[in-house]
Amino acid sequence: MTTPNKASTNFNLILIIVSDLTRNKLRVLLYLMVITSAMAVILSSHHNRQQVIALEDLMQEKDELDVEWRNLVLEQRALTEHNRIETLVEKQLGMYRPTADDEVVVRLK
């Protein structure tokens, strides 16, 4: 009896695999569908994670902008406070509230 060489053994193995695949078409189809479904789950999970990361970044930016806006509102209120404006007007411009003696009434005919 002759011993089969390695090349013919590999060729026989390939023929056996191909013949099994052609006989069990439904199993091969189901196997490919399972693999495709698994890849789809992996891709959708990855996409979902990327969206969650983007959402968290946007939420952090929103919080930072909200804090900045509140600080600007406080600064605006402080700068437009009437007592502060009156003090600045009196000190820097030398203005004051007119007294009754300083008032002049103009009559139009």
Image (cartoon, helix red, strand yellow):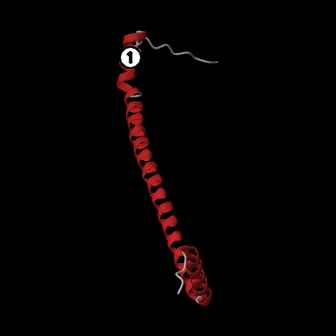
Would residue 104 be found to the left or right of residue 75 on screen?
Answer: right
User: Residue shown at 58%/17% (left/top)?
Assistant: 107
Whether 49 is drawn above or below 4: the answer is above
Closer-to-camera residue (19/48): 19
Would residue 34 be found to the left or right of residue 77 on screen?
Answer: right
Using the rendered image of the protein, determine whether residue 99 is visible from the camera's viewpoint: no
Whether 91 is drawn above or below 12: the answer is above
User: Residue shown at 41%/36% (left/top)?
Assistant: 73
Closer-to-camera residue (65/19): 19
Which residue appears farthest toward the bottom when viewing the image?
A: 23
Residue 76 screen position, x and y as percent: 42, 31
Residue 78 screen position, x and y as percent: 37, 29
Would residue 47 be found to the left or right of residue 79 on screen?
Answer: right
Quarter of the figure with residue 26: bottom right
Residue position for label 1 = 88
Quarter of the figure with residue 15: bottom right
Closer-to-camera residue (50/37): 37
User: Residue shown at 52%/81% (left/top)?
Assistant: 3
Closer-to-camera residue (92/49): 49
Whether 102 is drawn above or below 42: the answer is above
User: Residue shown at 35%/24% (left/top)?
Assistant: 83
Whether 51 is drawn above or below 14: the answer is above
Give the amino acid type for the residue marked by disc 1 in the picture.
Leu
Q: Residues within 10 Å of mark 1 (few under 14, many from 20)?
A: few
